[in-house]
Image (cartoon, grey):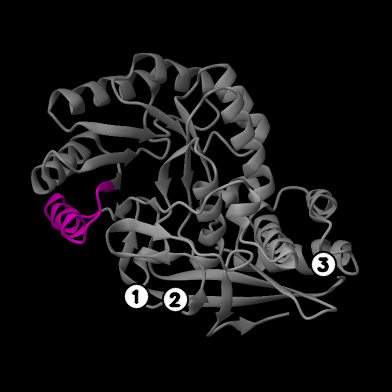
Amino acid sequence: MKITAIKTGRLETPLKVPFKTAVRTVDKLTDVIVRIETDCGAVGWGSAPPTSKVTGDTVGSIIGAIDEAIRPILLGRDAEALEENLLALDGAIVGNTSAKAAVDIALHDLWARSIGQPVWRLFGGVGRSIETDVTISVNSPEEMARDALRGKNDGFKVIKTKVGLDAETDFSRLRGIREAIGPEIKLRIDANQGWKPGEAVRILERMQDAGFDLELVEQPVKAGDLKGLAYVTANSPVPVVADESCWSPADALRIISERAANMVNIKLMKCGGAGHARQIIALSQAMNVEVMMGCMLEGKVSCAAAVHLASAFSCVTRIDIDGPVLCATDPIKGGPCFEAGGRITLDDAPGFGIEEISGVKWLS
């Protein structure tokens, strides 16, 4: 089964409400869609969002990397030789993790389809359902409290929100959210590198003393400050998750070995796809550390890959794969079912289960 074509296109999906963080506001989800075709008619699907503020990748850079560096390396290769194809992909170009992730996902999808099995089963899973949190956009404390209550009423058992710019405003936001959702709903925060180590410990202690009962905090300090991250981890009353600090298996090994965080957050767009994600999971399993599986603002194709990984491996205990939940429409037929309340279920469809995607503007 030879790879005969690798096509790229752009897909835009409207969001239910604008998604707001400290660095951007968007009202639609944008994905670069990848379609790998073979000489026997089998197709593999992948995708990647342009997340320039995090990965540095834009629509143009993702498509350019695939067109100019990745496609020439993979055309004509055996689609069933997954490991060899992933090695070729990794060496095709330096960096460009989002472009690599999109193609990696399509290669995994195609490989599993060639065997006629879902990816979760080939990774040793049993197809267990998982449950994601839902992210509350940054707004006034009153609006965030209303949004959090809406999430609770929709059935979500875990709420996540951004913090890190102004401690007093964050405090007011979290107080309003906790008062709105009550004590039974788990509450996570993501500081996006917004604090200094000592400041982080003081703020987290104050938040817990106020009864916010935070389940975890993501990336409280700068990504490169592992010593500071380790200080927060050792002194914080809230478990610490390394996000922007963890891009690769090598990063994960260092973070875990130095006890710089309680767990790492795997995002396919950071590490370059499911291949490297599996390596991070293997490291975590070997060192008895739990893992969080997250996503950028991503659509159903790439999120399907994250869901299959999260379902297959028991060390993945925290789930933040809510991109499809935030979309007003679903242009994708097949794949995991994102149900009300954050429950995500899988079926026996081969690969990642994607059948058809409507509305793609094919570019190459």
Mark 1, other Cα within 10 Å: few <14 / some 14–19 / many ≥20: some
Mark 1: which secondary structure? loop
Seen in the picture, residue 6 relative to 217 is either above or below; the reply is below
Residue carrying label 3: 71
Q: Is residue 112 above or below residue 364?
A: above
Q: Earlier in the sequence, mark 1 or mark 3?
A: 3
Q: Residue at x 48, y 52 (%)?
A: 295
Give me the disc on residue 15: none
The answer, for residue 252, to whether it is visible in the render is yes
Q: What residue range appears in magenta?
A: 139-159
The residue that label 2 is drawn on is 13
Residue 56, can we see it? Answer: no
Per the model, the C-alpha gap separating discs 2 and 3 is 26 Å
Left or right? Give the position of 48 relative to 191: right
Q: Is the magenta stretch mostly helix, strand or loop?
A: helix
Q: How crowded is mark 3: few (under 14 residues within 10 Å), some or many (20 or more)?
A: many
Q: Mark 1 points at which residue?
A: 328
The magenta stretch spans residue 54: no
Q: Which residue is drawn at 32% across and 53% down?
A: 135
**Do the residues under discs 2 and 1 have CB atoms within 8 angstroms?**
yes
Tag 3: amino acid = Arg
Callout 2, which amino acid?
A: Thr
